[in-house]
Image (cartoon, grey):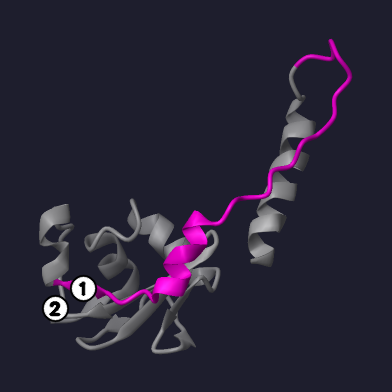
Amino acid sequence: MEVRLDKYLWAVRIFKTRSDAADAVRNNRVLVNDAYAKPSREVKVGDIIAVKKTLVTYTYRVKELVINRQPAVKVIEYCENITPAEELAKLNTPRETIFVFRERGTGRPTKKERREIDALMEQMYDEF
């Protein structure tokens, strides 16, 4: 049986949608055996998949191939989470927040200001 990387990541519930999985692979947030891959790459039993999400890089070992999306309870039959403890500890670190000063009475941010704030936040997460 052959399974595409994006389909496998979706099937074992690492990503909510297959297109989210494909986008992450295309944007070099997924490594397979320490190498960047394409969404169409074939996954094999024993492969080590590293997925970077926000601050943490999760690591998984492929135990079994699967095509269809699995219930959360059955995921452990198909992949093993081998993320190091120091990576998981990053989830508990206090996050730096950005406070943008606005004059009193100016209301909510405009669409343009909101995009600037979102770009700034995304830039902060990419630095980690």
**Picture coordinates of residue 22, whole percent (x, y):** 42, 64
Q: Residue 98 magenta-drawn? A: yes
Residue positioned 11% across, 70% down in the render: 77
Q: Quadrant of the C terminus?
A: bottom right
**Picture coordinates of residue 122, whole percent (x, y):** 66, 53
Instruction: Return the mark for residue 107.
Output: none
Amino acid at the residue labelled 1: Cys
Instruction: Return the mark for residue 79.
Output: 1
Amino acid at the residue labelled 2: Glu
Frontmost of labels 1 and 2 is 1
Q: Are marks 1 and 2 in contact (CB under 8 Å)?
A: yes
Q: Examine the rendering and report whether any part of residue 8 can be seen.
A: yes
Q: Please, which residue is most extreme toward the top here?
A: 105
Badge 1: how crowded within 10 Å, few (<14), some, or many (20+)? many
Of residues 17 and 46, the one nearer the viewer is: 46
Structural distance between the alpha carbons of marks 1 and 2:
7 Å
- The local secondary structure at tag 1 comes to strand
Figure check: 46 above or below 111: below
Highlighted magenta segment, given as a residue range: 78-107
Figure check: 55 above or below 57: above
Of residues 105 and 21, the one nearer the viewer is: 105
Figure check: 114 above or below 2: above
Task: Determine the main secondary structure of the stretch shown in magenta.
Answer: loop
Q: Report the residue marked by disc 2.
A: 64
Q: Quadrant of the N terminus?
A: bottom left
Q: Residue 115 magenta-drawn? A: no
Residue positioned 36% across, 74% down in the render: 83
